[in-house]
Image: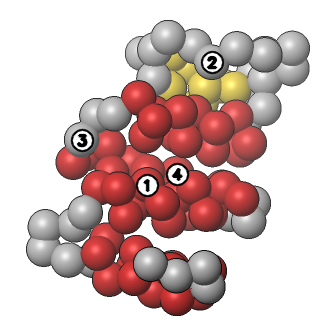
Amino acid sequence: MTDDREVSRKLFERAASASPPVDFALYALAYDDLAAARYEAALVRIRRALALADRAEFRQVEFTALQALHPVPGNVAAPAARCSTTTTKAGCRLT
């Protein structure tokens, strides 16, 4: 492995674009997108990862990206259900 962020991203991008894609590579890229405030990119990537494997850590990244894109005033806890792509003025609609 490497400590160089750009080298790491390139390795993760290669794994994410493999056939089949590596779910944890998509997760790592989505997490990096969150850290860089690229919330829409994070949401796209993490939903690709969720299509491969429905994991709690993937859902948390999805929730965080949705919260950043559609903040809900006063909401301090993640909901038990996943948010759909349908949103309301107050935030995401739970499904």
Which sits earlier in the primary sequence, circle 3 or circle 2?
A: 3
Depth check: 75 or 23 in front? 23
Up/down of 17 relative to 65, above or below: below
Up/down of 18 relative to 77, above or below: below
Q: CA distance from mark 4 to mark 3?
A: 15 Å
Q: What residue would you read off at disc 4?
A: 43
Amino acid carrying label 4: it is Leu
Quarter of the image that includes the N terminus? bottom left
Q: Position of residue 80 (x, y in %)?
A: 50, 11
Q: Residue at x 86, y 14 (%)?
A: 74
Q: What residue would you read off at disc 2?
A: 78
Q: Residue at x 64, y 38 (%)?
A: 64
Amino acid carrying label 2: it is Ala
Q: Is there a contact, CB below 8 Å, between mark 1 and mark 4?
A: no
Depth check: 47 or 53 in front? 53
Name which quarter of the figure residue 76 lies in.
top right
